[in-house]
Image (cartoon, rainbow, N blue to C red):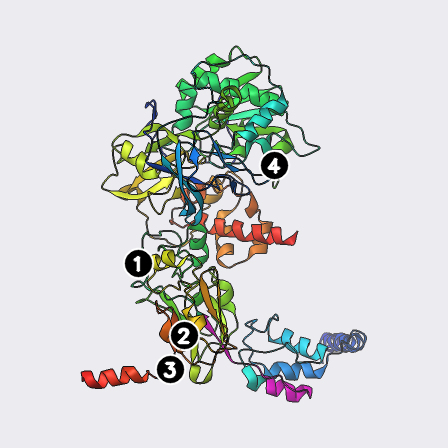
Amino acid sequence: MLRTFKIGGIHPAANKLSANKEIENLPLPDSITILVAQHIGAPSKVIVSKGDKIKVGQLVATSAGFVSANIHSSVSGTVSKIEMVTDSSGYKKEAIIINVEGDEWDESIDRSPKIVANFDFDAKYISNKIVSCGIVGLGGATFPTHVKLMPPSGMKAKVLIINGAECEPYLTADHRLMLEKGEEILIGTKLLMIALGVEKAVIGIENNKPDAISNITKLSEKYNDITVCALKVKYPQGGEKQLIKAVTGSEVPSGSLPISVGAVVNNVGTTFAVYEAVIKNKPLFERVITVTGKSVKNPSNFLVRLGTPVGNLIEAAGGMPNDVAKVVMGGPMMGKSLTSVDIPVSKGTSGILVVNEKEGHRNEIENCIRCGRCIEACPMGLEPYLLMPLAENKRWDDMESLHIMDCIECGSCTYTCPANRPILDYLRLGKSTVGTIIRNRK
Amino acid sequence: MNSSLIYSILTISLLGIASAVILYFAAKQFFVYEDPRIDDVEQSLPSANCGGCGYAGCRALAEAIVKDNSLEGKFCPVGGNDTMQKVAVIMKLSAPASVRKTAVVRCNGTCDNRPKISQYEGAKSCAIATLNSGGETGCQFGCLGFGDCCVVCDFDAIHMNPATGLPEVDDDKCTSCGACVKACPKMLIELRKLAVKNRKIYVSCRNTEKGAIAKKACTVACIGCGKCQKECEYDAITIENNLAFINSDKCRLCRKCVSVCPTNAIIEENFPPRKTETINEETNA
C-alpha cells in the first residue's frame, strides 16, 4: 500500500538519467572557493588568513550563533585569498580561496572503509559531534541539523522520518547513497534517534526507486525500531510537510513547525553525513552531486569536494553541451539558475542540471483564464491564481491573510499553468516582502 | 375622485413627512462639526491623491493641516510653493518656503558602459529580478532596467530609454512625490535639490566595491579615488565605502568635480557647454 499526501501534487517526467551510475570521485580541482554562508542562519566567521597551510577537514570558519554552522576545508593547500565572490544567490558573498596542494587529511579523521555498527554514544556526544562537524540539511535547505535535534521547550519528538523521497526530477544522489551506503544510513538513523530521544524511525522512499526500497528494507530488518515506508511517486513528496502527512497521517498546522506534531525530518544525505561525523570523526566537506541533463554526454553522480567550481563537474560529465540554455544548481523545479560556471558547489548543492534550449524554452505569457489548475496542484492548499495579482498590486496584507507564508516554493503552480504565467516569481516576492513586514512588527 | 387614490396620496405624503421629521431630528442629534477650512484647503490642493506629502490623500493632508493648525512639516510636492501659499492664506499662517526637488537616477550603467554577462528570463519586474540575482551585469548595485519606477509614477515623469536601458526623469513633470524612490529595489533614485534652469550635479553610481572591481564591471563607475573631494571648495563631497556622494544643499554647481573625475562618474545636467569644448569645435570646423 503506497502512502502519499492528500492535497495537490504534480507528475513531472522523472528523467532519472543517472540512476544507474555508481558514485565516482571527482578529481580534485586546482583551487576551491569555500563560501562562509552555506547554511540557513548567520554566516560563519573566518578563522584563517592568507598564506595559512590547510589540511583536509580542518576547521576554517566557525559557527556564528545558535542557528549557524562550522565550515571545514575540503582540500589541503594554502589559503590564497579571502574575498567576495558571486555565489548561487547571484550576489557576492565572503569566501576563502584555497590553492590545492596534494591531498593531506587531518589525522583525526578515520579513513578506513570499515562499517562500525556497534557504538555506545549518548545523545549529548552525538549532538556535539554534529555541531563540531558542521552538519546541515543536505536536502537543499541546509538547515543546521543540531537545531532540529533540540526541540523548543514544551515540544517533544515522537518519530524521526528519514527523507529518501528525492522527488525532484533528474536528481539521483540520494538514490545512489541508499544503494551504495545503505548500512551507513541505517546506523546514521540510529544515531539520530538517540540524539533526538525517539523510539521510532521511518525511512520514506518514493516508489520509483524499487531497488533502494528493497535494499534499505533488507538492511533495516535487524533494527526493530526502523521501518521503511514506500511512497507514491508524486512531486513534491519530499517536502517536509508532505512527507509527514504521508508517513504519519498528521498535518502540520499553518505557520507551525513539524515538531509541533512530534516529527523531525532529515534527508538521507544528512543521515549519512551524521554517520561519518560520529563514527569516523569526519566533518562535512564533500557530498554526492548528480550532474545531469538531456544533452549531457555522461550523466553521473560524483562525490565532490565542496568548493569545486561547477564547471569542473560539467567537464567530468562529458563537457558543456553545445545547446546549453542554462545551468541549474539543484533540480528543475526548485533549483537556482546560475550566472556563471565559476560558482563553487556548496553544502546545499544536490545536483547540477544542464538545461538545453529545447527544454528551457519559455512560451509567451498569457492572461490568467481562471482554470484553477494551480489550486489543484498546490500541495499546501493555497490559491496561486489570486496570490499572483495580489503581489503585482502590492497588496501585502491580503497576501498574509491568504497564507502566503505557508508557500514552500515548490513550483507546482507554475508547472501546471496553461497560460505560462510566472506565478512562483510573484509568490516569492510576496513571501519576501510579507516576511520582512512580519519581522519588523516584532 | 377614487377613494383609494386619495388614501394612496395621503399615505405616501404622511410617510414622507414622518421621514422628514425623523431625519431632521437625526441630523441635529448626529451632527458632526467639521471645520469649514478643511474643505477650503482641500479645494486648493491639486487632488492628485499621490501620497507625496506623506498623508493618505489630499483630504487627509487638509485635515492634518487644520487639526494641527500649522504648516510645519506639511508640503505638497505636486502643487509646490504656489499651492502652499494658497493654503497659507486660507489658514492665515505663513507658508514655509521649500526647495524644489526632483528625482535623480544615480546609475549610468548603459548597455555600452556596463556589458551584460548573463541573461535573466524571469518575470520582468525589478522587485522580482533583485531577489533572483544582482542583475545581468558585473555590477550588482546598478539599475536592473525593468522599469518598476516607471510603472508607479502618477505624473508621467519617468520613462525607460531603450537605447541606454536606464530610466530618465522629466524634471518639469516630476513632483518629487517619492513613489519611484520607494519602488527601486536598488535604492538608486534620490530626491535631490533642483537648481535654476533644472541644473544638477550628482555622482551617478552606487557601487561600494573597491575601485578596480567596480571599474571592471562598468567603465563609468565611481572608484572612490577622492579626487572630487580634494577639488571641492565647498565641502560638499563625502567618500564612504569606495563611493563619493555630493550633498546637493552644499553644492554650488561649480562643476570642478566633474572635470577631475577620472571615470566620468559625476554627471552635470542642463549646463552650457564648457568654453574649451566650444573652441575645439570652432577650430575643427
Q: Would you say the residues marked 4 and 2 are in contact, meaning their CB atoms lie under 8 Å apart?
A: no
Distance between the alpha carbons at the discs numbered 2 and 1: 26 Å
- The lab-note entry on whether marks 2 and 1 share a chain reads yes
Front position among marks 2 and 1: 2
Disc 1 + disc 4, Cβ < 8 Å: no
The disc labelled 2 sits on which kind of residue? Cys
Q: Hey, what amino acid is under mark 1?
A: Pro
Q: Secondary structure at mark 3?
A: loop
Residue on which the image places disc 2: B257
Q: Which residue is mark 4?
A: A257
Of tags 2 and 3, the one toward the viewer is: 2
Query: Which range of residues does the magenta coloring cover?
Result: B84-104
Neighbour class for label 2 at 10 Å: few (<14), some, many (≥20)?
Answer: many
Identity, as a three-letter code, of the amino acid under mark 3: Phe
Please identify the residue farthest to the top as the structure is shown. Answer: A222
Please indicate whether residue B197 sits to the left or right of residue A299 in the image. right
- Which of label 4 and label 2 is nearer to you? 2
* C-alpha distance separating marks 1 and 4: 45 Å
Q: CA distance from mark 3 to mark 4?
A: 61 Å
Residue B250 to residue A341: above or below: below
Question: Marks 1 and 4: which is nearer the front?
Answer: 1
User: Of marks 3 and 1, which one's residue comes earlier in the chain?
Assistant: 1
- Label 3: which residue? B271
Disc 4 secondary structure class? loop
Q: Is residue B264 visible?
A: yes
Whether B3 is drawn above or below A35: the answer is below
Q: Which residue is mark 1?
A: B115
